[in-house]
Amino acid sequence: MSAVRREKWYVAAKKADFKGISEKFGIDQVTARLIRNRDVVGDEAIGEYLNGGLEHLHSPELLKGCPDAAKLLENKIREKKKIRIIGDYDIDGVNATYILYKGILACGGIVDYEIPDRMKDGYGLNIYLIQLAVQENIDTILTCDNGIAAIDEIEYAKEHGLTVIVTDHHEPRFEDQEEGRKYILPNADVVVNPKQPDCTYPYKKLCGAAVAWKVICQLYQAFRLSEEASREFLVFAAFATVGDVMDLDGENRIIVKEGLKRLPDTDNKGLRALVQVNGLDIQMITSYHIGFVLGPCINASGRLDTARLSMRLLLAENQREAGDLALQLKELNDERKVLTQEAVEDACAMIERGDFEGDRVLVVYLPTCHESIAGIVAGRLRERYYKPTFVVTDTNEGAKGSGRSIEGYSMFEEMVKCKDVFTKFGGHPMAAGFSLERGRISEMRQRLNENCTLTEDDLMEKVSIDVPMPIDYITESLIQELSLLEPFGKGNEKPLFAEKGLSLLGARILGKSGNVVKLQVMNKSGRMMEAMYFGEPDYLKDYLQEKYGERKVQELFWGRGTQMELDMTYYPSVNEYMGRKTLQIVVKGFR
C-alpha cells in the first residue's frame, strides 16, 4: 500500500457580498471570504464570530438535567453527604474532575474523586469503583466525561443505594429498530448530556469539562457565589475543549477564546509550571500549544502512569511541588513520543508489506504496542493513509484498541452494526475505544470492511483552499488581522491559501533533526519570499527528483536557481529574528 496520501484540491466558492462585509466590519475582503467559508452568515453571526464574548454563552438552565443536578448536589452538600467524582484519565476527564472537585469544595461539599486507571480499570465507571464507594460510605457518585454508556454499572450502583448523577458528552447507546432509533440511557438520578434525547440545548458539541462547568455555574447560583468566580474554570474548560479535539465553533470557540485570555492571569501553580518546563511564554499561549505541547503532557500521565499525576499538578499548592510534577509529566510525554514513533513505524511496515491493499478500513494488530498510545498511533496512520483506522493491542484482559476516523465514516455507528464482536465499546463519530477477544480481531476487520460503504472518492482527502492568493498580497497587517479568526482547530481550521507555479530558487535543510526545509520561492510577478516546509524533507526531495531529476534537486540545495516549479498551499506568517521581521509562508502541501 502506498504511503503517499492522495489529495484533491478545490477552491471554496461560497458566495457573499465580500465588499459589503469588509466595509461594515472594517476587515479585508480576504478575511470576509474566510469567515464566509466557515459558514458564518449574517451580520449577527459575523459580529459574534469576530467579537463574541461571555454574553453569547447559553444559560446552563437550558441544558437538560443541569438544574436538577445542581439542585440535587445542593441538597447533598447541605446534608453533609459524601460525594465522589468519577472522571476519566484523559485531558477532558482530568479537567472535568478538577472543575467539579474545586467547585463543590467552594460550596462547602464533602467531596473526593477517583480517576480510573487506564490499564487496571479501563474507561469510565466500573463495578469495582462502585463497590469501593459502597465500602467507603459514599452517598453520591458524580461522573464526568463518562457514564452515559454505563448502563449495567449504574443499575448496580442504584441497587446498592447510591445516588448517581451522570455528566457526559459522549453519544448515548442506541438500537435501530423498525419504528426508528431507540436510545438506551442509564438509570441515573439525573443525566446531564447535550446529546441525550429531548435535550434542547442550542449547542451540542460541548466537551465533558464544559458540561461539568455548566453544572458548577448552576450550583454557584444556588450558593450565591459570584458569576466571576465560576469563570475561573474557563481556563480548564478551554484546555479540555482543545485537547479533546472538539469543534472550535459557536460556544466552544468562545470558551477557548475566553479561557486563553484568562490563562496569563491564572493563579493555578500547576498550569504555570507546565508552561514553564515546556519553555513557553504564558502570555503567548494559543490553541496550538494546548493541542500539541501542553495537552499531551496532561494526557501522558493517564497513558503511561496514572492520571492522578495530572490532577495533583492542577491541585498543587506550592511552586516546588508544581515544578516537580510538571517535569515528570513532560518526561512522560517525551517517553510517549518515542513509543509512538516506534509503533507507527512498525504499523507502516506491516501495512506496506501486508495484505491491506483492498481494505477501506484499516484494522492493525500491534500486540506489543502500549495500549495507552493506540489512539495516537491510529491517528497517525489515519493521517498517513487517509482511511478509518483501528489499532488493536494485547493487554492482560484480552485485546483492546482505539480508532480514529475520516469524514463520512461514523466510527461509533459502524461499530454498532457489529457490536456482538466487541465486549465493550464507545466513542464519537471520529474516535472510539473498544475491547474484544483476541480470536475475533480478524472477524472485526472483515465485518467492518464488509459493511463499509466508503467510495474511492471518499478515500481521497479533500483539501479546501480558502483563497487562491498570490504572495504579493501578503502584508504584515493582513497577517495580524487573521488573528481575529483564532482560536484555530477542528471546526475552525487555520486558513489555507494557494498559488500556482512558484519557482524554486534555493533550499536548505534546517532543524536539530533535519526535519525542516527552508525554500526560497518566486512567483510569476517576481515577488520572492521564504517558504518553510515542516513536513518530511525526504518526501519533498523524492517528489522533486521524480519530476525533475536528481541533478536539478542537488542544484536546488546548492542554492542555484532552477527551472523547477510547484503549486503550493500555504499560510502566511511573520518571522521575527533579532528584532528584524520578514514575511514568509508556511507550506502545507504541494504538487
Image (tube, rainbow, N blue to C red):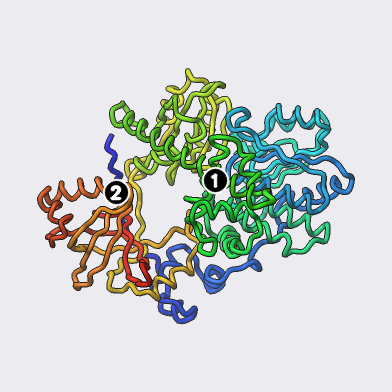
- What secondary structure is marked by label 2? loop
Residue 188 lies, in percent from the top left, at 75, 38
Query: In this view of the protein, which residue sits in the foreground, 94 or 293?
Result: 293
Q: Residue furthest bottom?
A: 23
- Does 538 appear above or below 256? above
- Does 435 appear above or below 81? above
The answer, for residue 29, to whether it is visible in the render is no
Look at mark 1 in the image and give the residue it sits on: 327
Relative to residue 185, is residue 559 drawn left or right?
left
- Amino acid tagged 1: Leu
Relative to residue 403, is residue 120 drawn left or right?
right
- What secondary structure is marked by label 1? helix
Look at mark 2 in the image and give the residue it sits on: 514
Residue 114 lies, in percent from the top left, at 70, 37
The residue at 43%/64% (across/down) is: 37
Query: In this view of the protein, which residue sits in the foreground, 246 or 279?
Result: 279
Relative to residue 122, is residue 158 drawn left or right?
right
Residue 93 lies, in percent from the top left, at 62, 44
Quadrant the N terminus occupies: top left
Judged by depth in the image, the label closer to the viewer, 2 or 1, is 1
**Labels 2 and 1: the sequence-earlier one:** 1
